[in-house]
């Protein structure tokens, strides 16, 4: 509370209402934290799985590129690479988890048919086709990796914010409200005792 609470029943009622709301908010935030943590653990496992699957494919793609460079020449390979269109079939959707948007990329099938012409190149076509197919097979995995890594980052940021709010309620706001309620209750009890004493003294004088 930002101001010193007065020792009145109305202030105690107000603080008790705020305390009840804070406890409810704490429970909801703690539940949100647990759900986000479970999602984060799952996404981290996804990252590891995708990264593991990409290692062998990357190794194969680089091997195919080396063979293409040897059989066709680096300049010819670079010329072919320059006419391959950029991938633009990505469809990104957002899924809400506890009010936070998590990206999901629709599964993308690799386009394995060459989209370039090898006119003027008399040899090495099979090696460049092989390098192309292997490289294109990485595209869906790269999209998936971008999805899960972005999700992990967003989840981690949201969890950190949620933990800060939980701690603020648990260690600052709720204890402060509880202390104010105890203080007001003690003051009210003391006032009641003083009133009873005055009444008794007044009654004694009248007799």
Image (cartoon, helix red, strand yellow):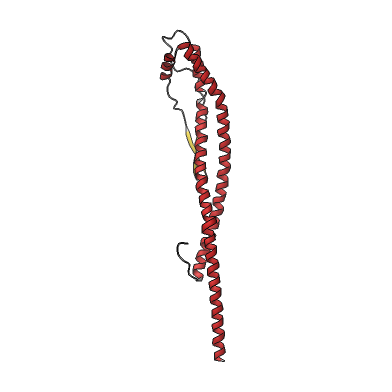
Splitting the image into 4 quarters, where does residue 56 fall?
top right
Q: Is residue 21 visible?
A: no
How many numbered callouts? 0
Quarter of the rendering containing residue 59 = top right
Query: Can residue 2 be spotted in the picture?
Result: yes
Q: Quadrant of the C terminus?
A: bottom right
> Residue placed at 46% from the left, 11% from the top?
72
Left or right: residue 85 versus residue 57 is left
Q: Quadrant of residue 86?
A: top left
92 is higher (above) or lower (below) than 57: below
Point out residue 40 in the picture as x, y percentages from the top left corner. Answer: 56, 40
In the image, what residue occupies the spot 50% across and 34% down?
Answer: 147
Query: What percent of the width, then of the height, locates residue 85?
Result: 42, 22
Can you name the residue that lies furthest to the top here? 122
Residue 31 x/y as whole percent: 57, 49
Question: Residue 106: x and y, percent?
Answer: 51, 32
Q: Is residue 73 above or below residue 37?
A: above
């Amino acid at each position: 509370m930002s101001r010193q609470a007065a020792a009145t029943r109305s202030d105690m009622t107000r603080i008790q209402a705020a305390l009840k709301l804070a406890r409810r908010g704490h429970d909801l935030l703690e539940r949100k934290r647990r759900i986000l943590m479970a999602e984060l653990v799952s996404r981290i496992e996804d990252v590891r799985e995708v990264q593991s699957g990409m290692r062998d494919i990357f190794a194969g793609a680089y091997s195919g590129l080396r063979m293409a460079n040897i059989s066709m020449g680096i300049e010819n390979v670079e010329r072919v690479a320059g006419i391959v269109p950029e991938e633009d079939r990505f469809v990104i959707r957002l899924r809400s988890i506890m009010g936070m948007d998590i990206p999901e990329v629709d599964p993308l099938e690799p386009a394995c048919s060459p989209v370039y012409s090898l006119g003027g190149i008399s040899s090495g076509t099979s090696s460049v086709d092989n390098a192309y197919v292997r490289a294109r097979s990485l595209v869906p995995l790269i999209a998936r990796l971008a999805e899960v890594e972005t999700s992990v980052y967003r989840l981690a940021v949201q969890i950190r914010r949620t933990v800060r709010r939980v701690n603020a309620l648990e260690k600052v706001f709720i204890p402060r409200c509880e202390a104010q309620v105890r203080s007001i209750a003690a003051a009210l009890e003391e006032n009641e005792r003083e009133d009873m004493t005055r009444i008794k003294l007044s009654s004694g004088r009248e007799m």
